[in-house]
Image: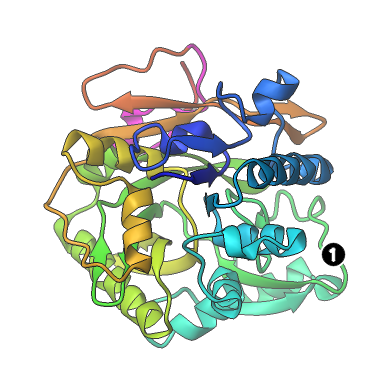
Amino acid sequence: MKDLVWVGIRNSEIEYSNFIDNSIVLYGDNVNSLQNKVNKRINHNNEKNYDFIDEFYNNEIIKQVKKNPNIKFMYYSQIYSFYSMKKLGLLNHIICLNNQDLIEFVNNKFKIKEYLKDYVPVLNYIYINGEDYNFDKLRKKYGNVKFVIQTEEGSGGAGTIVLSENNKKDIKLENNCKYMVTKYCENNIPVNIHILISQNDITLLPPSIQIIELLFNKLIYKGSDFIAYKKIVNPKMNSKLKEYAFSVGKLMQEKGYRGILGIDSIIYDDEVYFMEINPRFQNSSILLNKALQENNLPSLQELHYNCFLNKNIKLKAFDVNYSSYINEYGVLNRKFEVEPIEKLDSINEKIKCENFSYLSTDIYNKSIKKGK
């Protein structure tokens, strides 16, 4: 699309999209990437880098607007786009943006779960304040189990802690901060599904398994596997996931939401439990785009745009025979210092990489192992 720039994390997000040619991103070999400008990858999940990254985005956006007053921007994340462009006074240059209150509501893990618990299954939960955290009290109430503790916001595992007998002394919660506590479900299968919402349509895209690894007491996203989903998830759970996703989509549609959404759930004990909504594109969007392109279908970016034009979103059925795997994080002093690199794997290829934090083949047997 003429005069349209993608603002995202990785240039690979539009690699298989013919809808957008130009981008402002953190990672990639294109001219307008932070990686290209500073000659290294800077972790966007590390708080110490936030100001530097914001400054990079702002400078590049202002340059583009000065060069072309008609230019428009499509963002990877709606919540970030609103805050960023409002600060710059350039909200009129964004396309595909929902109402601020609606985006904040959908993005809030606590509020959205409170709202959806009457419509789809969710795990039982309680709230605690950081200053009131007491492991023994939790055990007395729930028994000898592990717990998952979450903050209101965060992605990729940031803000999600696993609490157990072994690490209870290491967990420090912030005072004056509210946390949601649920039981940790052993041997669950974490899944994700993209949906597209227009005025008249709710379109479900092929689901994937999320590769999650426990690192430093946090559940960290390590990749997506569309191939494994078809191998592991039985028809009954697949039907339930899609039924609940459609219900969530219908509720969001009635609230006026338009465009792409990612829904995270877990399959556990013969049920699908809703976890959270991401009002943005996903790490796995690149895999869907690759499959869409192979089937001569519009990219997610174009479909997202069409949702805001209230066009009918009709897609023929297609398969996604790809998975993405994230290389080991660079780690320093038990903190993630280097942004990981994703590798693409197809159903007919073996991964050509020396070190991964898990083996892709073993997930088909519901296990994830370390190794080469």
Is residue 83 at all visible to an observer of this figure?
A: yes
The image shows residue 281, relative to residue 10, as above or below, that is below
Residue nearest the viewer, comparing 140 with 27: 27
The image shows residue 113, relative to residue 149, as above or below, that is below
The image shows residue 332, relative to residue 181, as above or below, that is above
Q: Position of residue 21 (x, y in %)?
A: 43, 35
Q: Is residue 363 magenta?
A: yes
Residue at 44 percent of width and 83 percent of height:
117
Residue nearest the viewer, comparing 66 with 143: 66
Considering the whole magenta stretch, tell me its main secondary structure: loop
Residue nearest the viewer, comparing 122 with 207: 207
Decide if residue 367 is on the left or right side of residue 207: right
Three-letter amino acid code at the position of disc 1: Glu
Q: Position of residue 201 (x, y in %)?
A: 24, 72
Q: Residue furthest bottom?
A: 118
Residue at 55 percent of width and 59 percent of height:
94
Which residue lies under the disc numbered 1? 174
Q: Which residues are magenta?
A: 354-368
